[in-house]
Amino acid sequence: FKFGTSLTTKMATKDRRSLDERAQLLNLWLDECPPIRWVAEKCGISPLAVAAAGFLWFLLFVLWGFMGDLVCKVVGNLYPMYASFRALEDGDHDEVSSWLAYWITFAAFTLLEGASAKLMSWLPFYYVMRLALIMWLFLPATRGAQALYRWAVAPVLRRYRPQVDAALARSAQQLCGSFSTEKLREALRSKTGEAPNCNIEELMAQELAKAAASRFVGQVSSRARTASPRPSPMRSEGREEAASVK
């Protein structure tokens, strides 16, 4: 019995040593990866713990969409934003046109997704498919945004462009008409009752002067009321008695 116990203990110790050696070898192998090494140094943990946390997050993302919306927004905006900035700074017309097509397609995709987000979120692996589609849109090897823009987005926008332009022009005219200078001048004149040859700057100056004057008069009257003392009851009674004696 003692021989069997000692043999079991030796085997468990050997297995523990082998696991520790494997963990050390895995730590050394993961330490060669710069991102994992940087996170491990900043957090003060081993590279194996960083890799295990990353793998757990990946499983949660794939199976349940953990932080899926944030990941898709970061991937769909961060690199395209920098690439668009670089194209504008370099003056590359082809790259600017390419990234404009991406942003138009991405905006159309975002609007379509927002209209059916609650329904689409019930699909299995929805965020994985969404992330793959976003990467397909802007990756240089695929250039999916240009193809989708030519096949679907541009024909629809060309078809409804006259109606959209007319609606925008009509809305701009109504907005400018509601805030026009003439209407504002007429409102001020009707309120102040000034002559029609007076311009809007003078009307506004007069209104401001009237408001300041009324405020100053109110402050002076309030200070005068607080400064004047009220007669005491004893003095008023004494005056009444003196008047009665006389």
Image (cartoon, rainbow, N blue to C red):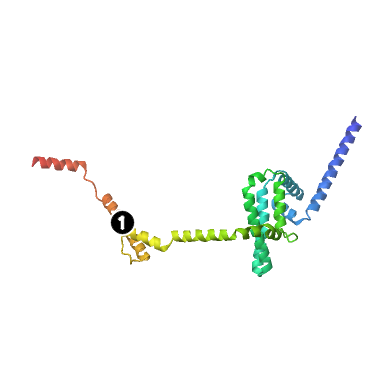
The one nearer the camera, 23 or 119, is 119
Image quadrant occupied by the N terminus: top right
Element at badge 1? Answer: helix
Measuring from the top left, give residue 38's x and y in whole percent.
Answer: 72, 55
Among the 4 quarters of the image, the one containing residue 75: bottom right
Measuring from the top left, give residue 176's x and y in whole percent.
Answer: 46, 61
> Mark 1 sits on what residue?
214
The one nearer the camera, 139 or 237, is 139
Eyeballing the image, is 225 above or below 244?
Answer: below
Measuring from the top left, give residue 172's x and y in whole percent.
Answer: 50, 60
**Residue 212 visible in the shown view:** no
On screen, residue 119 versus residue 192, left or right, reads: right
Among the 4 quarters of the image, the one containing residue 64: top right
Crowding at mark 1 (Cα within 10 Å: few <14, some 14-19, many 20+)? few
Eyeballing the image, is 240 above or below 83?
Answer: above
Among the 4 quarters of the image, the one containing residue 34: bottom right
Identify the residue shown where x is 48% and y is 61%: 173
On screen, residue 238 versus residue 210, left or right, reads: left
Residue sticking out furthest to the top: 1
Measuring from the top left, give residue 102's x and y in whole percent.
Answer: 67, 60
Amino acid of disc 1: Ser
